[in-house]
Amino acid sequence: MKRSVLIPALLAVLAVPLVAQSPADDRAAPVAVELSDDARPAPLTPMMREIRALTDAEKIQLDELKLRLESATSQAAHLEALAEIGRLKRDTEIGILEIQLKHAREAGRSETVAKLEESIRNLQSPPRRGVPQPRAEPETTRR
């Protein structure tokens, strides 16, 4: 019984914006929404402020590298821009981990510190994989 009342009410609520928008104006008007104090996001922690500053700086550099990539006139310039983008992303990831590491040390979280240090080491110098060996051909049996 509740379902039969809820569905028409929901459809009426969803249809209001469609009716309110005139066909002559294809653009939807911006809506200002006031957030109550309870709905406002919590302020960033010191660690998150550091991470945000790092990622904001990365975005600026990444935008510049993307422009270089788009305007590259040779394959070498294109590949170099791609390589720099890769280095920037790796360096940013390491930077985020280093920020987390600093805060984990300050909080005395030794297990987290060990995991973060290992992650940073692996990003700075990835473990080498062995040289691939050719597969041994299966022995054929002659009869």
Image: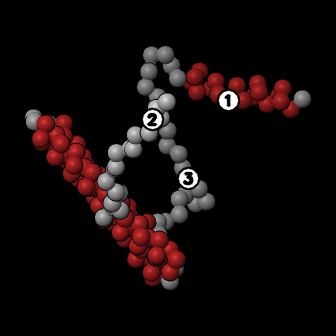
Hey, which quadrant is residue 125 in on the image? bottom left
What x and y, as percent, mark residue 123?
A: 34, 62
Which residue reaches farthest top? 23
Callouts 3 and 2 close, C-beta under 8 Å: no
Q: Nearer the viewer's eye, disc 3 or disc 2?
A: 2
Element type at mark 2: loop
Which residue reaches farthest left? 73
Element type at mark 3: loop
Q: Which residue is painted at 54% across and 58% down in the image? A: 40
Q: Which residue is painted at 27% across and 51% down in the image? A: 86
What x and y, as percent, mark residue 5?
A: 83, 28
Q: Earlier in the sequence, mark 2 or mark 1?
A: 1
Q: Quadrant of the N terminus?
A: top right
Q: Is residue 119 above or below residue 2?
A: below
Which residue is identified by label 2? 140
Q: Is residue 25 above or below residue 119?
A: above
Q: Which mark is residue 35?
A: 3
Q: Marks 1 and 3, how far apart in space? A: 21 Å
Q: Is residue 106 left or right of residue 132?
A: right
Q: Crowding at label 3, few (<14), some or many (≥20) Cα neighbours within 10 Å?
A: few
Which residue is identified by label 1? 13
Q: Is residue 1 visible?
A: yes
